[in-house]
Amino acid sequence: MKRGHADLPLHHGTVPPWLAQRMSLLGGAIVEAIVMEYGKSAFLRRLSDPFWFQSLGCVLGMDWHSSGITTSVINALKKAINKRSDELGIYVCGGRGKSSRQTPAELLSVAGKTGLDGNLLVKSSKLSAKVDNTAIQDGFQLYLHSFVVTNEGEWAVIQQGMNPDNRMARRYHWLSSSLESFIREPHTSVCGKNQGMILNLTDKLAAPTQQGILDLTRELPDKLMKEVSIILPRRHDVKKEDVNLKRLGAALTLAHETNINEFESLLLLEGVGPRTIQSLTLVSEVIHGTPSRFSDPARFSFAHGGKDGKPFPVPTYVYDETIDILDKAIHQAKLGDKDKSDALKNLSGISRKMENNFTPGNYFDKWVQHEWDTSYQYGGKTVFGDAKKPEEKPKGPVQLKLWDDL
């Protein structure tokens, strides 16, 4: 994938401090785990995938598909990564509004530290913005531009535009290693609502006409852009049709219905509760999953909920334990002990295997209600306040049989 985009409903408001700090800590740990296991190039490839980026935002506890997920995730990664850029070899530049206009200066600063060609990086930054804001006129005006570059010169761009008429935002992703030309088909995948005729000055079908017009006007011709008709819904609720129930059910089953001690590779996670295993399994997939696993980003909101309570409040106790476990695994792996990091990696693998024999029942709505009912036990929070204990206690223990009714 060279570049893709995703359409998102505009969603106003700010990220509360209690969530922003946790997003930065967990986001930084996830990035470090990816770089340690797969390398810097692999992290950039993930950033260039709009579905992976959406899944990352969900696992970090942001509203599962609002426009705010882009700004908040970029801010969290910038804070976490740039403090350790010398160690990770990754630099995050730019951001929203005024921060986006600082991108050239920040890239030149990175070039001074790494020996990269700063002018070339600045040119790449400006061209990627020009293509999506000017060469492709689809009704979205850019207001966020973030340029992520490694100390080896590879880069990824994430930028977002706004359409005030339909109150939608569109996010664009770029990847340098797959880019052949800024003016000839820089896009391989476009995921967004087909809005009919738009101006696209980079379509390869325009090549014969390009030359003739270029000779006269020094400008490229316009052409119809082909779009894949895939769009995230405008609503903020998470519904069962938004997720792959087999994938979600397998992860929940692994966490809540399996004796973890049965798996030799997971013995080092002994003592970790089922609710934390649920979160760790989804975090593990964000780190180790392949692109095909991120076609339903809403599933990852079942790791840490969402700040607006969709699908349920953010379980801050579980969030903190997830960060602590992942940080310790990374630290031990640096010292040569990879047992715990391998155990975490195996969570996503075991969950994938369980999907083969998993037949989900009518569990989705009941599971969401279960998360709401137990949220107070895990320090559940939303932007509206702390989760409260239900007035009536359930009669006896809840049996979480996902293939039958709860």
Image (tube, grey):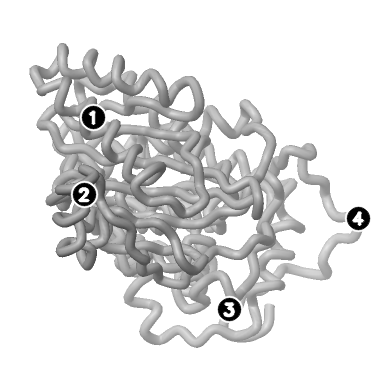
Between circles 2 and 4, the one closer to the viewer is 2
For badge 2, the amino acid type reads Ile
User: Circles 2 and 4: CB distance less than 8 Å?
Assistant: no
For badge 3, the amino acid type reads Leu
User: Circles 3 and 1: CB distance less than 8 Å?
Assistant: no
Look at mark 4 in the image and give the residue it sits on. Answer: 391
Disc 2 and disc 3: Cα gap in Å? 50 Å
Q: Residue at x 58, y 48 (%)?
A: 163
Between circles 2 and 1, the one closer to the viewer is 2
Q: Earlier in the sequence, mark 3 or mark 1?
A: 1
Q: Earlier in the sequence, mark 1 or mark 4?
A: 1
Q: Residue at x 42, y 26 (%)?
A: 100
Look at mark 3 in the image and give the residue it sits on. Answer: 402
Q: Earlier in the sequence, mark 2 or mark 3?
A: 2
Look at mark 2 in the image and give the residue it sits on. Answer: 183
Q: Quadrant of the N terminus?
A: bottom left
Q: Earlier in the sequence, mark 3 or mark 4?
A: 4
- Which element carries disc 1, helix, strand or loop? strand
Q: Which mark is residue 90?
A: 1
| Label 1 environment density (alpha carbons within 10 Å; few <14, some 14–19, many ≥20) | many
